[in-house]
Image (cartoon, rainbow, N blue to C red):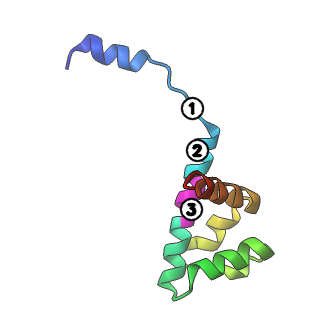
Amino acid sequence: MDDSLENSEIEKTSLYSIDDFEESLVSSTLKEVCVALKEKGYNEINQLVGYIMSGDPGYISSHNDARNKISSIERSTIIEVLLKNYVNKL
């Protein structure tokens, strides 16, 4: 590869979006939590709805640290990301 091309690519300013980062974090956390819930034999949708509606972390298994992972994100943020993704698919 041409060195001048590499240098020009390095010198470009990248835009960083907090919203994109937050959405990615929520999505990856939800995927990990769903996998953990499935591994323990739970219906992941029912458990997530119970957690989001009540705020009770007991709905989420501690398997693979799922409870701690989901508890680290505000429930309102989870709802916002889920709704945003849903509405964007309409």
Going from N to C along the chain, the mark reached first, 1 or 3, is: 1
- At label 1, counting other C-alpha atoms closer than 10 Å, the crowd grade (few under 14, some 14-19, many 20 or more) is few
Q: CA distance from mark 2 to mark 3?
A: 12 Å
Magenta-drawn stretch, dominant element (helix, strand or loop): helix
On the image, the x and y values in percent for residue 30 come to 57, 65
Do labels 2 and 1 touch, CB within 8 Å?
Answer: yes
Q: Is residue 61 visible?
A: no
For image coordinates 76% across by 59% down, the residue present is 76
Q: Is residue 13 visible?
A: yes
Above or below: residue 6 compared with residue 65: above
For image coordinates 30% across by 18% down, the residue present is 6
On the image, the x and y values in percent for residue 5 come to 28, 15
Q: Amino acid at mark 2?
A: Phe
**Residue 16: assigned label:** 1
- At label 3, counting other C-alpha atoms closer than 10 Å, the crowd grade (few under 14, some 14-19, many 20 or more) is some
Above or below: residue 14 compared with residue 29: above
Q: CA distance from mark 1 to mark 3?
A: 20 Å
Q: Look at mark 3 in the image and give the residue it sits on.
A: 29
Going from N to C along the chain, the mark reached first, 2 or 3, is: 2
Q: Secondary structure at mark 2?
A: helix
Q: Which residues are magenta?
A: 25-30
User: In which quarter of the view is residue 85 placed?
Assistant: bottom right
